Image (tube, coloured by chain):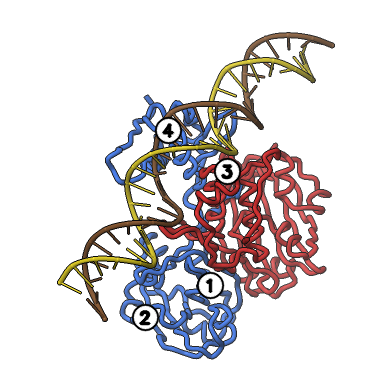
Chain colours: A blue, B red, C brown, D yellow
DNA sequence: GTAGTTCGATTGTCCGGACATACGGATTGA
DNA sequence: TCAATCCGTATGTCCGGACAATCGAACTAC
């Protein structure tokens, strides 16, 4: 016997989701070793008392995650992997917290300003219209790691400085009922200006990692525009990409 | 009449794919404007002479691409988008070519060396085992843009210097029957060493954008490990992210 | 007028079956 | 011995139907 899979029809959790979770857990803990054939879908469906479409839906979700590979005429295989998780739209705060670093935030600016041409274009608001501007320093282990400058359209969220120092911006947005959908990002590098150097405890001219981002919700509104600079000695972008089949 | 959708049952192209392509094209050319409801699936299926699962499969693929949003009880909506394409695992060569820049390559090194500890770990081969090493300079408009250093496991591919100068590494790998699956990337920044500065026509200490990548094929083998440095004035990473639902 | 309820609309989940298509190995032929 | 062909197997595509869950708006009651 290889694996004890089972589903609970009484649960409100969808059957395909129960199955995909169990398979993912089995892969994670090594019960399904890389290269293993998963056994054909029909037999698997019969064994679990499910229909083939349901089993396929479960498998497909893991294929999309990069954990499984299907081959017609062969079967479904566990991918030999150092695969962790593909890149998702995440906040620096959540990433740091997940990595066990206790992120700290100092709000430098939290005000309303007139939108510059660049900000207006990014957020899709009128030039010189009102937008929120927040500037933050993010720390780990008491040392500055990044300088974050963000702009938000008006009326979307009330930005409390206390909350901003206690958690991340994305969490506040989700808590306000905004469902994030996608973001457009640009990552680059440049030499630190005198002001940036001072804020980040670097020297003028030192290399900095930069990121610009516009985030959209599921109605297509731009809900955030940010310009961030990171100290490359303390931060780099790390992620996994999947090939789109 | 809003749209003339139709499918060709004689075609070997799957029906759901024909439909999703037509919908995507309609969105792209503006025939389906952002915010439009797509009309319910059952009616749409009836109009096209398809079954609901087939229509759902077509719609789902566009939802996965970020072009559509489904809401239970409401309908399926075209996303208000500046959505281009989500991040894919792509080669610098293809990206530049798609952007209309004629990429040029100069091969500096194309040889076999003993694997260092770092390379051995990344590629999953024995330390001091043989690996291919290639170093390339990539140009656009006659100016150097990036310095690319790559390692490949032995016996995977015969690396012809002429081919390397005529096309990109990923194309050669695909042409050799390797199906790329995923990659693990790290993007950072650092100051240029004297050697790097000279190769890239920058000054020592100038900020450089760096990228490290290990690429895996669908059997889980590491097929490439690369360390790249880019001139930040001429290159930055730009991409779109989708929120994992 | 406002709050709670009902109800229609639409997607989400699931079933059981059918045929097509591609891969890999075994068989067959040169 | 080696190449071409056949065939079993597993996934890919597609169908038609059923019921559940959720959203929004109309309706009702206070």
Q: Which residue is mark 2?
A: A159
Q: Is residue A55 left or right of residue B144?
A: left
Q: Which residue is mark 3?
A: B50
Q: Residue at position x 50%, y 54% from top?
A: B40
Residue B175 — which label?
A: none
The percent coordinates of residue A196 (x first, y second) are 52, 83
Q: Are marks 4 and 3 in contact (CB under 8 Å)?
A: no
Marks 1 and 3 share the same chain: no
Q: Chain of mark 3?
A: B
Between marks 4 and 3 in the image, the one whose residue lies nearer the viewer = 3
- Whether residue B65 is situated above or below residue D28 in the rendered picture: above
- Asked which secondary structure carries label 3, the reply is loop
Between marks 4 and 1 in the image, the one whose residue lies nearer the viewer = 4
Between marks 1 and 3 in the image, the one whose residue lies nearer the viewer = 3
Between marks 2 and 3 in the image, the one whose residue lies nearer the viewer = 3
- Badge 2: residue crowd in 10 Å (few <14, some 14–19, many ≥20): some
Give the Cα separation between the discs numbered 1 and 2: 18 Å
Give the Cα separation between the discs numbered 4 and 3: 22 Å
Q: Quadrant of residue B193?
A: bottom right
First along the sequence among labels 1 and 2? 2
Residue A214 — which label?
A: 1
Q: Determine if residue B189 is in view.
A: no
Give the Cα separation between the discs numbered 2 and 4: 49 Å
Residue A51 — which label?
A: 4
């Amino acid at each position: 016997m290889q694996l004890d899979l089972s589903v609970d029809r009484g649960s409100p959790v969808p059957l395909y989701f129960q199955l995909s979770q169990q398979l993912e857990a089995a892969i994670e803990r090594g019960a399904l070793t890389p290269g293993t054939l998963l056994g054909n879908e029909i037999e698997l469906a019969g064994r679990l008392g499910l229909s083939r479409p349901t089993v396929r839906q479960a498998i497909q979700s893991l294929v999309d995650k990069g954990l499984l590979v299907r081959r017609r005429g062969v079967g479904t295989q566990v991918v030999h992997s150092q695969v962790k998780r593909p890149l998702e739209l995440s906040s620096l705060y959540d990433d740091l917290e997940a990595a066990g670093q206790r992120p700290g935030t100092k709000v430098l600016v939290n005000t309303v300003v007139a939108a510059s041409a660049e900000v207006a274009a990014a957020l899709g608001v009128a030039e010189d219209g009102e937008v929120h501007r927040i500037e933050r320093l993010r720390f780990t282990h008491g040392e500055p790691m990044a300088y974050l400058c963000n702009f938000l359209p008006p009326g979307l969220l009330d930005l409390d400085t206390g909350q901003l120092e206690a958690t991340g911006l994305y969490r506040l947005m989700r808590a306000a009922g905004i469902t994030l959908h996608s973001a457009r990002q640009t990552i680059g590098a440049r030499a630190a200006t005198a002001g940036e150097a001072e804020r980040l405890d670097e020297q003028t001219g030192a290399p900095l990692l930069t990121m610009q981002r516009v985030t959209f919700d599921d109605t297509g509104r731009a809900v955030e525009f940010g310009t961030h600079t990171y100290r490359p000695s303390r931060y780099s972008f790390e992620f996994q990409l999947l090939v789109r089949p």
